[in-house]
Amino acid sequence: MYLIIRCPSCRTFTYVDRFQTWKLCPICGHAHEVAKVPAYLEVEHYLEAEHIVKEMEKHLHATKKPDFSPEETAELRHYYTEALRKKAKGRHA
C-alpha cells in the first residue's frame, strides 16, 4: 500500500510506501517525516499512485486552486473506494 502525500515545503504531490518513515522530496530535496504529513489517499499499487498524483496535480493546475478542500479529499477517497469495490466485484463475478 502507498500513501499519496504532499511535500510540506514545495507542495508537490508524491507517494510513499505506508511503512516508510521519511520521504525525500524528488523536487525540492526536503526530507520530511511521513507520519507528520497528511495523507490524501491510500492506494494499492505504486503505478496507481503515480497516475493519481499526476491527475491531482493536473486538477489543481486546471482549477487554479492551491489545495483540495476537505470535501474534495473525502470525495476523492470515496471515488477510489468505489472503484476498488467494482474491481473486486468484477473478479468474483
Image (cartoon, rainbow, N blue to C red):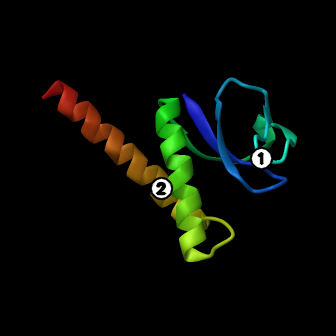
Circle 2 Cα neighbour tier, 10 Å, few/some/many (<14 / 14–19 / ≥20): some
Q: Is residue 56 above or below residue 35?
A: below
Q: Is residue 12 above or below residue 86?
A: below
Quarter-wise, where is residue 33 in the image?
Answer: top right
Residue 66 rendering spot, x and y as whole percentages: 69, 70
Residue at 46% x, 59% y: name it. 75
Towards the viewer: 59 or 37: 59
Circle 1 Cα neighbour tier, 10 Å, few/some/many (<14 / 14–19 / ≥20): few
- Furthest toward the left, the residue is 93
Q: Is residue 35 above or below residue 28?
A: above
Tag shown at residue 93: none
Amino acid type indicated by mark 2: Leu
Residue 14 rendering spot, x and y as whole percentages: 66, 44
Amino acid type indicated by mark 1: Ile
Is 25 left, or right, of 39 in this rendering?
Answer: right
What secondary structure is marked by label 2?
helix
Towards the viewer: 62 or 44: 62
Judging by the rendered image, the residue that carries numbered circle 1 is 27
Is 58 left, or right, of 16 in this rendering?
Answer: left
